[in-house]
Amino acid sequence: MCILTRLIKTESALCFLRKLDAINFSAV
């Protein structure tokens, strides 16, 4: 269960970083 939660957190964190990258890319 803990491992599953960790995976979900990592996945959402990666999605968040990708969104930030997309925003930065659009800004440039």
Image: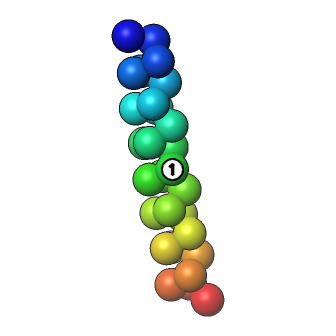
Q: Residue at x 47, y 18 (%)?
A: 3
Compared with 3, 15 (above or below) is: below
Would you say 18 lies left or right of 4 here? right
Q: Residue at x 51, y 37 (%)?
A: 10
Q: Which of these two is toward me, 14 or 4?
A: 4
Colour option used: rainbow
Q: Which of these two is toward me, 7 or 26?
A: 7
Under mark 1, the amino acid is Leu
Q: Which of these two is toward me, 23 or 11?
A: 11
Whole-percent x and y of residue 18? Answer: 50, 62
Whole-percent x and y of residue 27? Answer: 56, 84
Whole-percent x and y of residue 8? Answer: 40, 32
Instruction: Assess disc 1: are there few (<14), some (14-19) or many (≥20) residues with their C-alpha within 10 Å of its C-alpha.
Output: few
| The C terminus, quarter of image | bottom right
Compared with 15, 25 (above or below) is: below
Q: Which residue is mark 1?
A: 14
Compared with 6, 21 (above or below) is: below
Q: Residue at x 44, y 42 (%)?
A: 11
Q: Residue at x 38, y 10 (%)?
A: 1
Q: Secondary structure at mark 1?
A: helix
